[in-house]
Image (cartoon, rainbow, N blue to C red):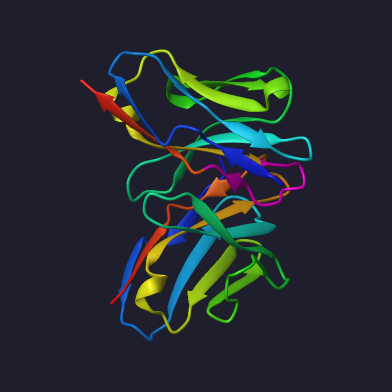
Amino acid sequence: AQSVTQPDIHITVSEGASLELRCNYSYGATPYLFWYVQSPGQGLQLLLKYFSGDTLVQGIKGFEAEFKRSQSSFNLRKPSVHWSDAAEYFCAVGNQAGTALIFGKGTTLSVSS
Amino acid sequence: GAVVSQHPSRVICKSGTSVKIECRSLDFQATTMFWYRQFPKKSLMLMATSNEGSKATYEQGVEKDKFLINHASLTLSTLTVTSAHPEDSSFYICSATGQRTYGYTFGSGTRLTVV
């Protein structure tokens, strides 16, 4: 079955500390992978995406993610977290055919001062 | 870049009435649009997929007679919640993809409250 797993429901990180949000997927076809961020009551903002090529992807707001096919993972990282990064983060998988994205359950990021 | 406009952002309606939510692609042709529903503290649940000019394909468990989806043009899809009830209260988000877009663009969402 196709699925996306985000093992961490809630993570708290100190401001300035590094961050890694985990994402594992199960997908039959070549996966297109995405990370989105959602602030309360808002829509989804795309942080970054991976379709092919370099497995280390740079995104907006200083985020990056690394695709590891052998581990079926696409973890999101940021070297230094800012208080404004507190939000809900969703990992999603799609395919070249443009079918609907499958989302993980999300990880809530809290940033402590 | 690709932009999707979703309206209204918030709506409150009385139980038994119908509400229409619009999703427009502003600068690209959206060959496919997706409608999601998001419960508080929950992930996005796909409700239906619509291709321009075709009937929407609904996910299992989604009532197609309650959630009417129309995708009559390449830039507009609508979701109508008919005979709304309090349990329909939720956050609804549309997403669009097109032949020339590389990925999926999301609307800003609609908070529906049925009283």
Q: Position of residue A90 (x, y in %)?
A: 49, 39
Hey, which quadrant is residue A33 in on the image? top right
Q: Which residues are magenta?
A: A94-104
Image-based side of B99 in relation to B111, left or right: right
Q: Position of residue B101 (x, y in %)?
A: 67, 43
Q: Position of residue A24 (x, y in %)?
A: 61, 31
Q: Residue B15: in sight, yes or no?
A: yes
Which residue shows up at 69% across the image and 36% down it?
A32
| Membership of A95 in magenta stretch | yes
Which residue shows up at 58% across the image and 50% down it?
B27
For the stretch drawn in magenta, what is the main secondary structure?
Answer: loop
Image-based side of A26 in relation to A47, left or right: right
Hey, which quadrant is residue B38 in on the image? bottom left
Q: Is residue B114 above or below residue A45?
A: below
Q: Residue B8: in sight, yes or no?
A: no
Task: Please name whichever residue, A62 or B113, is drawn nearer the observer in this view of the structure.
Answer: B113
Which residue shows up at 28% across the image and 26% down it?
A111
